[in-house]
Image (cartoon, rainbow, N blue to C red):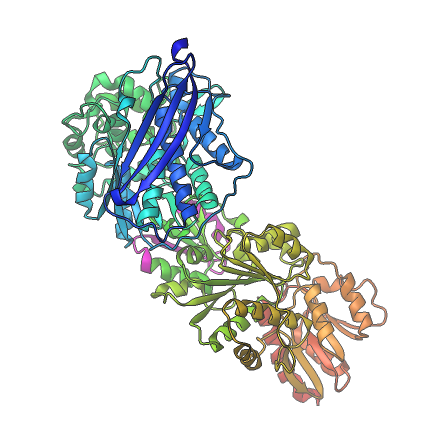
Amino acid sequence: MTNSHKAKKFIFTSYKLEPSKTRAIFNYAIEFENKQPSLSFSETIIFPRKFSVKNIPTGLLENVLSSVHLMLGISYYKLYCPPKIIIKSKPISKEQAEFWSTVYKKGLGEFFYQNKIDPSNLIKFPFANKVKTSSYSLKRKERMLVGIGGGKDSIVVGELLKENNKDITALLIATQKSSAISEAVVAKMEIPALKIKRYLDEKIFTEHLGAYNGHIPISAVFAWLGYLTATLYDYSHVAVGNEYSSNFGNIKYKKEDINHQWSKSLEFENLFQNYTKKFLSADILYFSLLRPFYEIRIAEMFAKYKQYFPVFSSCNRNFKVHEKRPDTLWCGECAKCVFVFTMLSAFLKEKELVSIFGKNLYQDKKLLPMFLDVLGFGKMKPFDCVGTFDEAQAALYLARENFKDTFIMKYFLPKIKNPKLLVEKVFKFNITDTLPEQFVLVGARNALILGYGKEGKMTEEYLKKYFPKIKITIADKTLDPNYLKIQKNFDIVSKTPGLSKRQVSVPYITATNIFLSQVKNIVIGVTGTKGKSTTSALIYAILKEAGQKVSFLGNIGTPMLGALMKPIDKDEIFVIELSSYQLDDIKYSPHIALILNLFPEHMDYHGSVEKYYAAKKNIIKFQNKDDYFIYNSQNDKLKILAKSAKAHKLTFAKDFNFKNLNTALKGKHNEQNIKAAIAVAKIFNISESDIKKAIAKFKPLPHRLESLGKFSDILFIDDAISTTPESTIMALETIPNIGTIFLGGTDRGYDFTELEKCLRKKKIKNLVLFPDSGQRILKSKAGFNILETSSMEEAVAFAYKNTPKQMTCLLSTASPSYSLWKNFEEKGEQFKYWIKKLSNKAK
């Protein structure tokens, strides 16, 4: 660049949306040193039909337009790469500026490499310290834009979504002139289309003294135009076909990885999703449906859609903006043609391939240098949208029989080492957090259901109904003690909540995430160490009493996927009890999240008390300012958590009139449960009379301070649910006149110091201690009459013999049940059984 044409500033000058003219205009300028006249540019986006912005929050629309303005500017910035960037249109925050600096720096990586520019300190987007940022709620129809480019990847996306009965519209973005290829593909797909026309400023195609030329991150440009189109035309998703292979770069330059496909990569997709969720709206999601797959898996899928063979192309010569395009769909000379031919050779016969490409590329000796680069035996991977060396070699290996006599096959096949391992590697399913849970199974070949209890069986029904092509296998410890070892043979696992994620070795989904990702209704999620079953059931009862259409799902109710087996009423409310197991890997938060309490539990599952607390706190992780977080303000941990919550924060009800409240729920802990349920009811403006009626009718759930009646003048109470010292202490504070208590079970290392103090304070004399923790509960046995046993029959006989008349025998073990029983329900049922069985003998 000559000194007379040295640029000093790139300016984002202005933008405007003109609904009446169905267009948006974005303006830019470059200023030079030495009093050279500045350059100004104007880019126009033409939309296909009229749209209304009246239901789009003004702040959101401005933020989307501002983002598109910044993205489109990259085509003009790269002409001179001025050292200073100025944003006159709309200031951005520091965090936003960091995003745009990253997009420009990494998106222009190949451009910098080719032009020998050092980007180290070049791109710094300016920011304003006082910019307020926000995410907006935006009601959307559940429908999708699908980016169609004319190649096999977008075709596979469209066909997979059609097969899964999704409401899809093709998104065509034509730069300067239309693409007959893309339009032919959409015609074959037989879906509606929105065609966006993008007109770059014509000055960009003229010669400018000292200007640079080169690659820009075009997929990032299309991502932003897709997001803008979804905003204007009421779409909830923008789906594209960026594959796993695009994550791998071409070369290192100035200590940075240079990736021709960076704006198709997982890194960009993550950045884009996080940015749009935080600064725009989480109600529109851009994602790649094909992210789990290497290109070779996509080629395998595409090979089944033979109707597209005569019309598809991804040869870049067919998509040049300002040059004459060839008459053929494939040039048969470039890296893209060589790579696609290689991929498809693994699945198609020679005759079919030749009909697509016009010749057998494996017989063309002139292509040897290109095959060297594509297969990984040359200098570097070509700067083109091609996959990895591993999958190229794997495809060649799979094509060996059909193409054994060709020049390329004879030359390269002996060079491929460990081909079977390569094939295994590139056919693996690679799940990512960017892929919404309801789309994870689209394209999967097989699935393993790990755990075949109530939820596992419902998952099987769900998969058979909505994904009939997926081969399903069941694995459960009751069927095979080594059931965890077969995971590697499957694309994906559906994990039961009772199985820790640490035991899963392949990509997995959960019923909780599938449900929450699909349901747009109001969801009330209830969790806490204790009391969540009672509270969620009470919330359900109050809503029902008030005439709301409500369903009770989750940890104690019906498996969540059961609700998806039939159409969901738009007014239906879902109350869900959520355990720490379900929250451990949650990706979505309920609209109303309630945490009752927190104290140590389930350390064996989570690995530590800190990880247990972290799992519980996940219930609010994905909430926004339009959601609600209800918490117990008497719990210090929850008070701290509330400070970081994004949602409306509410504490348990304080102003409710408890006078003359008729309830069978006893104890201070149940008072908290009632107040929590009332706090939820108040969000729905439910009347005090309906709340009181529901509470009066509500019966305590089984095994939760459940009175079993008097036998031989002894009151028996089943509190089998109490499996921590804290919950047993709550029971001791609630129940008077306890003569005998049953304690112990699985030893999770709990501290029983406070429990022993409470036992002595309450002067409880008779103790039954079950293994294993029973041996640790007391530091001193002095003053107690103790039976150590693993038999519930012996324990109940001891209670009949030793409990004074008119006093209570309480089952509240302060430890989990698994050392002797399947769960707390089985423990409680055995307690009931032996009370009745031995009652006659006790008389």
Left or right: 199 in relation to 71: left
Q: Which is more toward the observer, 390 or 258?
A: 258
- Image quarter in which the N terminus is found: top left
**Against 239, is 394 above or below?**
above
Q: Image quarter for residue 419?
A: top left
User: What's the residue at 66%, 89% (across, down)?
Assistant: 840
Left or right: 296 in relation to 404: right
Q: Which is more toward the observer, 524 or 730?
A: 524
**Against 286, is 336 above or below?**
above
Q: Position of residue 6 (x, y in %)?
A: 41, 14
Total numbered badges shown on the rendered structure: 0
Q: Which is more toward the observer, 807 or 476?
A: 807
Left or right: 521 in relation to 209: right
Q: Which residue lies furthest to the right in this view?
A: 782
Left or right: 505 in relation to 193: right
User: What's the residue at 21%, 36% (across, down)?
Assistant: 348
The span shown in magenta is: 465-491
Q: Where is residue 751 in the image (x, y as percent from the top left)?
A: 74, 58
Q: Which is more toward the observer, 629 or 611?
A: 629
- Image quarter in which the C terminus is found: bottom right
Residue 416 appears in view: no
Q: Position of residue 388 (x, y in %)?
A: 36, 29
Q: Image quarter for residue 182?
A: top left
Q: Where is residue 699 in the image (x, y as percent from the top left)?
A: 57, 79
Please tell me whether residue 252 belongs to the stretch shown in magenta.
no
Residue 478 appears in view: yes
Q: Image quarter for residue 832?
A: bottom right
Please tell me whether residue 467 belongs to the stretch shown in magenta.
yes
